[in-house]
């Protein structure tokens, strides 16, 4: 098996597009289960990425696996609308129970970026307005519509010229007080509507309630609630991108409930189906009824097996009290990381909400973000046996996103391994500086 694997790995650069095959850390694995990967090297790795915030109930949860196997005995493919099947109807009912406010009607697609595309199209169709306002630093996807509102990194937009029907304002700045941030928000929206685009031509404001790929920045409740207020004042729909924050990641079913804000439209994906492709554009029946037959459609969206996996995922979150576990263990992890920060001068801010934890890495001499150091630390952590991911405009933030089922012992293990990686990084850097002198 190893020989065959090695042969396949040698073809990696020629068979897989570099844009998908060269991400960190490119770890060859042979099995996943719970909070762990098993590597081709025979080593067991603690996974603090959850497949980039996807496997919220852990890898291959037995109930999810069983639901997929049982579902495969009946269906492999829809397409919904041409036929109708139980799992998609049951899932729509379940989602209506856990989504905030009046959101109770759902369009099923395959991914987060599709869910965003649907949300943008729905908002424009309903309001008959052409423009959308998003926030600098947010990431909403890489298809052209979603890319038009994504500004976490300029390289995502290079040569692609996403449509010009979007405008951006500043995301929450953690260096400001809540009052300062709200004042800046109001000022930027007023200037935008006064000088750039009339508010009555703006269909929607789209927001990541917690900045994800852009750096795991957690705004205060009042700032998010002010956005709702501004939208209401101008008759603008509010879209929450809950692709990463949804299904328990913040300690509630959705970040909307964490921030006590009811959006008009939501986009969901990632944690919904434990790794099977599924995305959802969600809104009230009142809005959805204005989106007529054929104005938006899908061939593969709402796949029967993906819906079965989603139903099982929701059931596991309920049965295993994973929302409560998230709140308890997240608080524990934050305290452990505060202790780590005191020990290592390269650690800057630690930003967290639920199981979305960002550990900023700085050059201690310049006090500037250090993306190069992050990659070195992540590689050293991998050698210790724990897998993290990265985020931030310069890749300066270690992204810690374990499954909601993570235990205190696993948190202890992972942070201890990160500690060892940081010690090795500091030692190596010190030796290099001594050599250069």
Image (cartoon, rainbow, N blue to C red):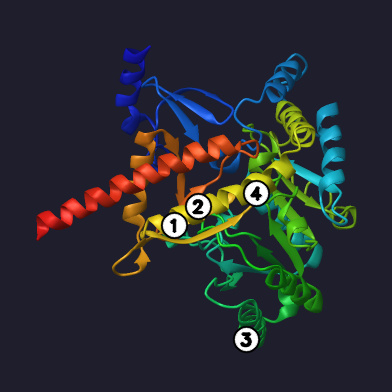
**Distance in Å between CA atoms under marks 3 and 4:** 30 Å
Q: Which mark is residue 243?
A: 4
Q: CA distance from mark 1 to mark 2?
A: 6 Å
> Given this view, does label 2 or label 3 mark the residue nearer the observer?
2
Q: Residue furthest top?
A: 1
Using the numbered discs, state the Cα–Cα distance from disc 2 to disc 3 in whole angstroms: 40 Å
In this rendering, the answer to whether 98 lies above or below 218 is above
Disc 1 target residue: 341
> Which numbered disc covers residue 337?
2
- Expressed as whole percent of the image width and height from the top left, the position of residue 80 reads 79, 33
Instruction: Name the spot of residue 95 as percent of width and height, x first.
Output: 82, 42
Residue sitting nearer the eye, 53 or 368: 368
Whether residue 92 is visible here, answered yes or no, is yes
Q: CA distance from mark 4 to mark 2?
A: 26 Å
Q: Nearer the viewer, mark 1 or mark 4?
A: 1
The local secondary structure at tag 1 comes to helix
- In the rendered structure, which disc, 3 or 1, sits on the residue that comes first in sequence? 3
Residue found 76% across the figure and 70% down from its top: 228
Q: CA distance from mark 3 to mark 1?
A: 39 Å
Q: Do we see residue 49 in this rendering?
A: no
Q: 10 Å neighbourhood of mark 1: few (<14), some, or many (≥20)?
A: some
Tell me which numbered mark, 2 or 3, is placed earlier along the sequence: 3
Residue position marked by numbered label 3 in the rendering: 191
CB under 8 Å between callouts 1 and 2? Answer: yes
């Amino acid at each position: 098996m190893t020989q065959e694997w090695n042969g396949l790995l040698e073809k990696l650069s020629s068979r897989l597009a570099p844009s998908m095959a060269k991400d960190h850390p490119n770890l060859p694995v042979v099995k996943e289960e719970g909070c762990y990967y098993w590597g081709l090297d025979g080593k067991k790795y603690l996974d603090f990425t959850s497949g980039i915030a996807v496997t919220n109930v852990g890898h291959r949860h037995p109930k999810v696996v069983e639901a997929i196997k049982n579902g495969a005995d009946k269906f492999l493919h829809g397409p919904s609308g041409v036929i109708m099947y139980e799992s998609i109807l049951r899932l729509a009912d379940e989602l209506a129970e856990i989504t905030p406010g009046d959101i109770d009607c759902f369009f099923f697609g395959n991914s987060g970026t599709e869910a965003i595309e649907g949300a943008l199209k729905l908002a424009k169709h309903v309001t008959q307005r052409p423009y959308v306002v998003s926030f600098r630093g947010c990431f909403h996807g890489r298809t052209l519509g979603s890319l038009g509102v994504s500004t976490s990194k300029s390289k995502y937009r290079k040569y692609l010229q996403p449509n010009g029907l979007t405008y951006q304002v500043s995301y929450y700045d953690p260096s400001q007080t809540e009052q300062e941030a709200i004042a800046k928000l109001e000022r930027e929206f007023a200037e935008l509507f006064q000088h750039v685009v009339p508010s009555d031509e703006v269909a929607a404001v789209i927001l990541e309630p917690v900045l994800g790929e852009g750096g795991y920045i957690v705004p205060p409740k009042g700032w998010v609630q002010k956005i709702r207020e501004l939208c209401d004042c101008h008759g603008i729909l509010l879209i929450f991108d809950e692709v990463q924050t949804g299904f328990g990641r913040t300690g509630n079913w959705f970040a909307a409930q964490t921030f006590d804000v009811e959006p008009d439209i939501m986009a969901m994906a990632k944690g919904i189906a434990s790794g099977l492709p599924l995305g959802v554009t969600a809104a009230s029946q009142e809005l959805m009824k204005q989106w007529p037959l054929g104005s938006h459609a899908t061939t593969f969206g709402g796949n029967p097996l993906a819906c079965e996996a989603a139903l099982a995922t929701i059931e596991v979150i309920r049965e295993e009290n994973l929302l409560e576990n998230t709140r308890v263990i997240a608080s524990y992890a934050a305290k452990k990381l505060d202790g780590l920060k005191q020990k290592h001068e390269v650690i800057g801010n630690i930003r967290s909400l639920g199981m979305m934890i960002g550990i900023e890495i700085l050059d201690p001499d310049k006090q500037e973000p250090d993306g190069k150091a992050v990659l070195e630390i992540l590689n050293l952590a991998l050698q210790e046996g724990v897998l993290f991911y990265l985020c931030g405009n310069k890749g300066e933030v270690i992204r810690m996103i374990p499954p909601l089922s993570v235990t205190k012992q696993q948190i202890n293990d992972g942070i201890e391994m990160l500690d060892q990686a940081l010690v090795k990084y500091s030692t190596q850097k010190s030796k290099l500086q001594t050599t250069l002198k």
